[in-house]
Image: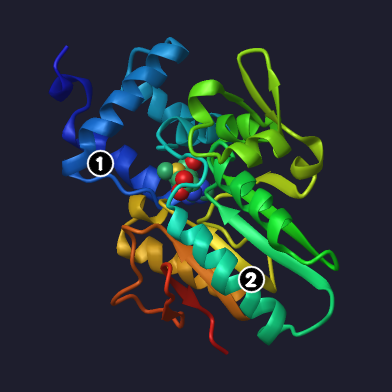
Amino acid sequence: MSDLEFLKDAEFELYRQLIYAESGITFTPTNRSILESRLKERLREKGVSSVKVYYDSIKADKEELKGFLDSITTNLTRFFRNQAHFDALEKYVVPEIINKIRKGPSGVIRLWSAGCSTGEEPYTIAMLLNEILPPTWRFEILASDISLKCLMTAKEGFYAESRIVGIPDNYLAKYFDKVNGGYKVHADIQSKIKFDYHNLKNDSQQRNLDIVFCRNVIIYFDEVAQTAVINRFYDSMASKSFLFIGHSESLFGMATKFEFLKTEWATLYQKNV
Ligand SMILES: C[S@@+](CC[C@H](N)C(=O)[O-])C[C@H]1O[C@@H](n2cnc3c(N)ncnc32)[C@H](O)[C@@H]1O
């Protein structure tokens, strides 16, 4: 069966609009083949032969829609992805918060890893903050994703040998147990992270966050959806807080109040009020 026969233009349009309305994820003629291959796989798994029948089922059943949205996401991630961001977090952002913004002898840093995939990003942040924060400071991390499958892996905190590349040896020894076939994150580091389902098309109800990481997520959205997500982050963040986006993503030309911030290590954004 050729791809053209698999998904007719009108059907592509229906799926495209539904996915966009429900998640912000944007399919265009250029990346249509990605949707087609993921949809084919989903139909095979579900034993459904008609794209129209499956469309009707995701329209009618919210749980099936969730599962479908999960199946079309791209979840590529790794520990210490883009080290420059973690250098900026350690050498610029955390010292700014502790010494200049809050100035207190103690406190809590609240951080959100939005679009955390299988957990490598929030675990990287948790290990780093655990190393660098003074003993009188604590941190809390919210890590969320639209993919329930990814969240299950993230919560479990078990990673096959092939996926632990990038973790420095001293971190691996300190924060992981070697178990059959891979490595398991220690429970005390896991306890600093709350993993939760959240679709970025909705308000998170979070307020006063000090730092948001949303890296390699808005790249899948069009500009309207990107702007809406970024402005919702703004509302959920504290005064003088910091936003990290992926290194191939940018807020340039976008209607947001974030200010561009160039540090010695990486560029990021600040809510500068
Ligand atoms: C490529 S991964 C990035 C993971 C990690 N932030 C990183 O940079 O390594 C993108 C993640 O964004 C999630 N995502 C996509 N659209 C989303 C939405 N509307 N709400 C929440 N998460 C979403 C996907 O499920 C996926 O796990």
Disc 1, SS: helix
Considering every residue shown, the one lying at the far front of the view is: 170
Crowding at mark 2 (Cα within 10 Å: few <14, some 14-19, many 20+): many
Nearer to us in this view, 188 or 72: 188
- For the N terminus, give its image quadrant: top left
At a point 64% along the width and 25% down the height, the residue shown is: 183
Amino acid bearing label 1:
Glu
Whether residue 193 is situated above or below residue 91 in the rendered picture: above
Question: Going by the image, does 235 lie left or right of 254?
Answer: right
Residue annotated with mark 1: 13
Q: Amino acid at mark 2?
A: Val
Residue 4: x, y in percent? 14, 24
Disc nearest the viewer among 1 and 2 = 2
Label 2 CB-ligand 1 distance < 8 A: no
- Residue at disc 2, secondary structure: helix
Quadrant containing the C terminus is bottom right
Res 168 → quadrant? top right
Q: Are marks 1 and 2 in contact (CB under 8 Å)?
A: no
120 or 227, which lies in front? 120
State the image coordinates of residue 145 (x, y, percent, origin top left): 56, 45
Residue 205: in sight, yes or no?
no
Quarter of the view holding residue 203: bottom right
Residue at horizontal 69 percent and vertical 61 percent from the top: 132
- Kindly identify which residue carries mark 2: 94
